[in-house]
Every structure is written in C-alpha cells, then in structure tokens.
C-alpha cells in the first residue's frame, strides 16, 4: 500500500523546490509559479499575500495548490492530493477557484459534500497561448498605465466584472477595490483614441516561462475598431522582447468574438478551465 499523502503550507524555505516542481509544466502552472515565487513577500496594495500548500508522499511533491489570493490547482494534482488540500480550502467562507476542469470538478464535489456552498459564478473557459514564432500581431501601440489613469481603470475593472456576471465590487469594500486596481497599475497597458483610454489589458504574470494576460477590456462605445487587437498585440510584443517563451490568456465559453480575435493573432487552445466564485450557503 502506498504511503499516505500529507499536505502543509509552503514555507519560504520550500519555495525553490515548489517552483522547480511547477516549472515541469510551466504553461499549465504559470499562475501557480507566479504565486510560488511570491511566498514570504509582501503582496501588492489591496492584495493578499501569496499562500500555497504542497502535498507530499514520502517527502516527494505530488501536488501544489494555491490558497490565497485565489485557489488554484497544479496541472496534474489527482484526487488524493486534492483530498489532502481540503482542510485548507474548506475553511474559506468566500473563495475563487480557477484551474483545469478535472481538478476543479473533483474539488467542488468534495467541498459540496462537506458543507453547503453557493456558486456566485460558475463558468468554463479555454486557455489559449501563442509563441513568437507563430504570432500574427496587429500594429499599434499601448502605453504603460500611470497614476492619472486610475479612475478610468477602476470603471473598467468594475464593468468588466459585472459583464462577467460577478458581484458588483461597489456593493462591497469600494476602498479596497480601488487599492487593488491601483496595485495593478504597473502591470496595466492602455490604448488611447484621441487622448482617451479606450482599452486596457494587464500582464499579471511576467516570467521567462510565459506572460499571463488578464482583464482585457474595451469600452463599449469603442468596440469593433481593433483596439483590443492592438492592445493584446502590443503586450505580446513586449513579452517576446523580454524573452518570454509564450503569452497566454483565457476566453470565457461562448465568447465567440474573443475566440476570433485571439485566433487571428495566432493564439491556440491548450487547456479547458473552470472558474467558480463561491460562498457558504
């Protein structure tokens, strides 16, 4: 009989070992890799410190899970590893989990077995990636966001979440929401038209293994004019010039316009994801 799997919170001294494990599938574990290197470091304003758990069998790593700021499972965590992570995850009153469908399905079933929970959002997404050798990028520029861009970016972040069917952040802690957006300013790139911001995108992970783009949003009145194509292309060029292996992002199931946009730029699907925002029932 194989030895039992045991899980523990990742400590600073575990960081390099966990990073090496996750780097075996950098594309599938890019967000977790970014979380792992931040263990023991102060988070951005409005953001929780990164916290992860590692599952081991006889000392060898067999799974890694992100706990905060959000829940994430590594690309190969099996049911035994997920069960070992449950004591850390089931205590969350509110949580957001986003990972491969198989792992999230198993985790969600176990969480529901243990306590009533209500999904505030439950959707499937497709993860896309593009490498420099196959990218077909559009022309145009996107500039780094500056402090004076905060107000429009707060509006964009709020509207983007609402369009996704997520709770309106202005009905919660508005001050911390604004701090969270402010903390992301260094990762934001904006596209302007006649001196007005019309599109924003965030390079939330910037590693040699790959860049992860999130929060791509075009103001409704400016859609259909190529601004998102311009912004994403500019972010891809920046990533490739910095030596990134690839750029990745996720498209919500049913977003045909997004699929057309990204495939036109050379992105190809590589994984199916499930995202659940939940609270205790």
Image (spheres, helix red, strand yellow):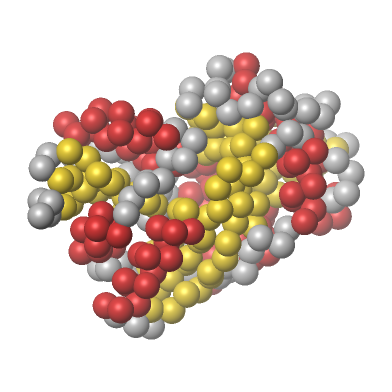
Vertical side of 44 occupied by 180: above or below: below
Q: Position of residue 165 (x, y in %)?
A: 62, 69
Query: Residue 56: which quarter of the image?
Result: top left
Count of numbered labels shown in the rendering: 0
In this rendering, does residue 280 appear at all?
no
Quarter occupied by the C terminus = bottom left
Residue at x 27%, y 77% (from the top left corner) = 114
Q: Position of residue 90 (x, y in %)?
A: 27, 68
Q: Position of residue 271 (x, y in %)?
A: 55, 48
In this rendering, does residue 224 appear at all?
yes
Out of 202 and 17, give the one closest to the viewer: 17
Residue at x 82%, y 29% (from the top left corner) = 138
Question: In the image, is 167 to the left or to the right of 140?
Answer: left
Question: In the image, is 191 to the left or to the right of 148?
Answer: right
Vertical side of 56 occupied by 186: above or below: above
Query: Residue 270: which quarter of the image?
Result: top right
Residue at x 67%, y 46% (from the top left corner) = 216
Vertical side of 251 occupied by 115: above or below: below
Quarter occupied by the N terminus = bottom left
Residue at x 66%, y 22% (from the top left corner) = 132
Out of 177 and 135, give the one closest to the viewer: 135
Query: Residue 19: which quarter of the image?
Result: top left
Q: Position of residue 59 (x, y in %)?
A: 12, 39
Question: In the image, is 255 to the left or to the right of 9?
Answer: right
Q: Residue furthest front?
A: 1
């Amino acid at each position: 009989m194989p030895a039992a799997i045991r899980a523990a919170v990742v400590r600073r001294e575990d960081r390099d070992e966990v990073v090496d494990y996750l780097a075996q599938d950098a594309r599938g574990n890019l967000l977790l890799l970014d979380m792992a290197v931040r263990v023991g470091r102060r988070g951005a304003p409005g953001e929780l410190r990164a916290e992860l758990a590692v599952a081991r069998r006889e000392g060898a790593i067999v799974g890694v899970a992100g706990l905060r700021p959000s829940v994430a499972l590594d690309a190969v965590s099996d049911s035994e590893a997920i069960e070992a992570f449950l004591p850390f995850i089931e205590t969350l009153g509110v949580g957001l989990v986003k990972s491969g469908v198989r792992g999230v399905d198993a985790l969600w079933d176990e969480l529901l077995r243990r306590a009533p929970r209500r999904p505030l959002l439950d959707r499937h997404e497709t993860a896309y990636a593009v490498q420099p050798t196959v990218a077909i990028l559009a022309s145009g520029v996107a500039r780094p966001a500056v402090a004076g861009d905060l107000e429009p970016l707060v509006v964009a972040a709020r509207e983007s979440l609402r369009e996704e069917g997520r709770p309106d952040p202005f009905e919660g802690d508005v001050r911390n929401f604004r701090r969270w957006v402010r903390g992301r300013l260094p990762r934001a790139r904006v596209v302007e038209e006649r001196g007005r911001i019309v599109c924003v995108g965030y390079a939330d992970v910037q590693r040699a293994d790959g860049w992860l783009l999130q929060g791509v949003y075009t103001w409704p009145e400016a859609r259909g004019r190529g601004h998102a194509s311009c912004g994403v292309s500019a972010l891809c060029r920046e990533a490739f010039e910095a030596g990134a292996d690839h750029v990745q992002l996720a498209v919500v199931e049913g977003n045909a316009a997004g699929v057309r946009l990204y495939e036109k730029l050379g992105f190809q699907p590589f994984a199916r994801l499930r995202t659940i925002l939940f609270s205790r029932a």
